[in-house]
Structures are given as C-alpha cells and as structure tokens.
Image (spheres, rainbow, N blue to C red):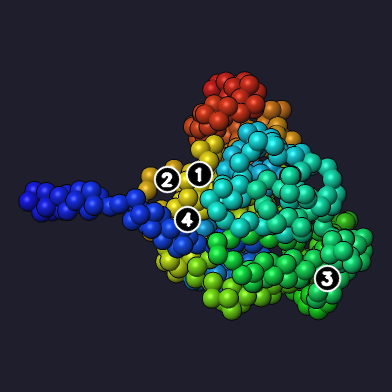
Amino acid sequence: MNRRHFLKAAGLGAASLALETPQIAAARRTEKKANRPNLLIIHTDQLSSWAVSIYAKQLTRTPNYGKVLLETPNIDALARRGAILNNFFTNSAVSTPSRGCLVTGRYPHSHGAYRNNIELNRDEITIAEVLRRNGYDTGYAGKWHLDGPPKPGWMKPQRSMGFSDCRFMFNRGHWKKIVEQPDGSPKVAPYKVIGDEKSFTTDYLADKTIEFIKKDRKTPFFYMVSIPYPHGPYTVRPPYMTMYDPKDMTIPNTLKKSSPAGKRSSAESRLRLNKARYCGLVKCIDHNVGRIVAALKDKRLLDQTIILFTTDHGDYMGEHGLYGKNQWYRTAYRLPFIIRWPQRIPPGTVVDNFVTNVDVQQTLLGLMGVEPSGREQGRDASPLLCGQETEWPNEAMIHHSSLKSAGIFTPQYELVLAENGRHMLFDRIKDPEQNTNLFGKPPHAATVRNLAARILQHHKEVNSPALEWLKTQVEKLAPHA
C-alpha cells in the first residue's frame, strides 16, 4: 500500500470510529456474542494413539509396529474435517495432574493436583469458569478426578469449578453401569455389573451429552463429557466384549524382551485378551462419538461447535512388561488430539508441532476470541490450527512429582532426569520402541547437557518445587554425562 492509499484508508477508519455511537458499539458487541462458537470436549481415559485408526495408520510406518487393530470411523471423521495433532503430549501421564493441566492451562505444581486423588486448588480459574463469566451455558458429565479422594463423589455446584450443570459429574471411578434413581439422581453399580446400551457408562454419558445439546438456549454452550474408558477393568457391554479376537492382537516386542521365558506364554495370553477388550471399549466410544456428532447435526449446530477429542494419558498395554501409565515411556505421553471447527480450522489440517496439555486452555480460548484468565502457563496454539505462521519451540516438558522426575520430549530425543540419579535418554527416531538407554554413553554427553539445561531453565521459569534437586543433578552432569 502506498502512502496516499494508506492515509486515505487511515482517514476512513478514523471517520468510521468517530461516527460509531454507543448504540452501534453495543450492537457490534451483541453481534460478536451471537456468533460465538459452542465448545464440546470429548475426553477419554487412558486411550493410546494406536487405538485410534487415523493415528494407527501412521504408526504402521514405525519399524516393528504391527498392524491396525480396529477402525474408529467417527473419531477419524473429526480429523478429516478438522485438524489432527501428531505430537500432542501430556505433561504428566497420570489422570489427576493431566486433567488439571487441561482445564487450567497450568503445570501440576501450580494447579495443586500434582498426583492422583488430590483436589485442584480451590482458587484455580478453569476454562469452564472463564466461559461461564463470558455468558456460556456450561456443563460436565463423567469422571472429573480433581476433587480429592471421594469415590464416586457426585459433584455439587459449589465444587464444580465453573461447570454449572454438574448433575452427572463424578469425581473418580470406572463404573460399568449408571442408573437414575426415582428422584433423578444417578447411582453407580459395582464394577462387576455391566450395563446395557442405555446404562453402560459410555452410552449413559453420551445420552446426557445429547440431552444437553438438544436444550433450547439463547447463549452458546460449553460441555465436557469425560468417558472413564478404555481404562481398566477391561470389560465392556455386548457386543463389544467379544467383537475382537484375542488371536488377532499384536504383542509388543518389548513385552517379549521383558518377560521371563517361563512366564512369557501366560503373559501373552493375558495381554491378548485384555487388548481385545480394550479395543471393544474404544469401539464403543467411537460409536457414541458418532451419536453425539449426529445430535449436533440434527440441531444444526455442528459447524458452529468446536469439537475436541482427546485423552489424559495412554496405556502401555504390555510394552516393557507394563500396563497402565505412570512411567516415562512415550506411549503414555504422546496422545491423540483431534479438533474440528470448519469456520477457522481448514479441513485436513495436520500439525506436527509439539503441543501439550497446558496449551489447551489458551488454544481453545484463542480460537474462540475469548480473553484467558491471565494465570495460564501454556501457549496459544490456535495459529497452528489455523495455518498461520508463529514462533513455536518444539518441546514437551514432563512433570512427575510422584516419581520425582522431570523430562523433555524433542523431535529426536526424550531425556528424563530423576532425583535418584537413574536418568534416561532415548533416541526417538532410531529407537522408537525405547529399548536402549543412551544416558552415560560418551557420544551423547553434549546432548544430555543441552537437554538438561532446557529442563532446568523451564523449571526455573515456572518456579517448580523440583528445582532444588534438578540443580544438583544437572551440576553432576557436567563432568560425568
């Protein structure tokens, strides 16, 4: 633009601002509010990337990976019409701290729920509270796991942290059946009791989500449904319990290497059965994702709603002889993250940048044009989702208070520093199965020092309680790494 055109445009802009009356300004604000998107978060528990077929088809290119075990067409469809993040990590691969990071945008030591069954600091400002203050109708159904030890711990509004409709929000547990009492209150059955297509927990929570979507309202909504699966116990209602044949399940190479020869056969048989049922749990989730999306479409809200599908951590499912999470290997940390909103996110977007749980709150609010609380410690990744250029260091920080460890993922390496000195370094490209700990190998000393310095600097910036022992360990690395 030349100077003349610039001055002309500037003059017109100034004139239009000068002519804007309070009534016009109010009308503009009303119009902006009217165009605000809804937000729906579908959150799962202990879902590994290999169990979502759009991710599994990428993983098959990894040496020794195996095959795609199940198809998840409804989840995959969200990615095809939205964005898929190939390098989304949790900052702590344990339910409580991971969930706390997601809803506050803050690291575990900051939000207070740094290990399982500890409540979130009562003064935290969750994304629900931010949106509630901005006129959103907020609600939550399913597992919360941020209110301390109560189990199931049905939530009350005074403890729901911004989720106004919390009737079906329970603190923790992996119940297989929920029924409503005559007064409308929900009640869980013992774990061994498995419900049907109306009372099985996944179906029940999907029904409650659909009921919330179908409500007539004049304001936008934010709803979070937290499905407590495919976390164990690995049981699911028919027909999903027997939908997958244990004989078709793959066995991780690292299970074979970690199991004693005499017990390997029984370990593999147990794994095949658990993995088949895990796949059934995921398939049931995918079916209900389809139901929820159909409800949005029927209500003509689909393209006006940001849909995020993700999880809190993965499941090792036999890798390195482990089940569950709570260790340092990548499967518990690198997670599925799929987001759909065609108004701003081009369909088929693939993001390879590293994004983590603490980035989610600022990213969603950035997409929505809502001011964050100002307490967040994460980054706004919305430019990445919208195809815009932005400065973005590719690293994901690990915070693990329970195991007194801290670490970093980069495109090539994972380094974990432990207070007890049992550090680990893996080459994520050459050794994707993480068989060989490179820590202490002279050719990698400079890499260790560089990554350790980045970990230490990060913990200084966020005032982490791990800082004291980290300083000691990093000092030891200079002469001995």
Which residue was labeled with disc 3?
199
Tell whether label 3 touches label 2 (CB within 8 Å).
no
Q: Is mark 3 on a helix, strand or loop?
A: loop
Which residue was labeled with disc 2?
392
Disc 4 marks which amino acid?
A: Met
Q: Residue 368 carries which label?
A: 4
Between the residue at mark 4 and the residue at mark 3, the CA separation in whole angstroms equals 34 Å
- Left/right of residue 405 with respect to residue 367 in the rendered view: right
- Identified at 63% across, 21% down, the residue is 468
Classify residue 467 by image quadrant. top right
Q: What element carries label 2?
A: loop
Q: Is mark 4 on a helix, strand or loop?
A: helix
Does label 1 or label 2 sit earlier along the sequence? 1
Classify residue 281 by image quadrant. bottom right
Q: In this view, does 98 lie above or below 318?
A: above
In terms of depth relative to the viewer, which is nearer, 240 or 439? Answer: 240
Circle 1 or circle 3, nearest the eye: 1
Does label 4 or label 3 sit earlier along the sequence? 3
Which residue was labeled with disc 1?
372
Does label 2 or label 3 sit earlier along the sequence? 3
Q: In this view, does 430 lie above or below 446?
A: below
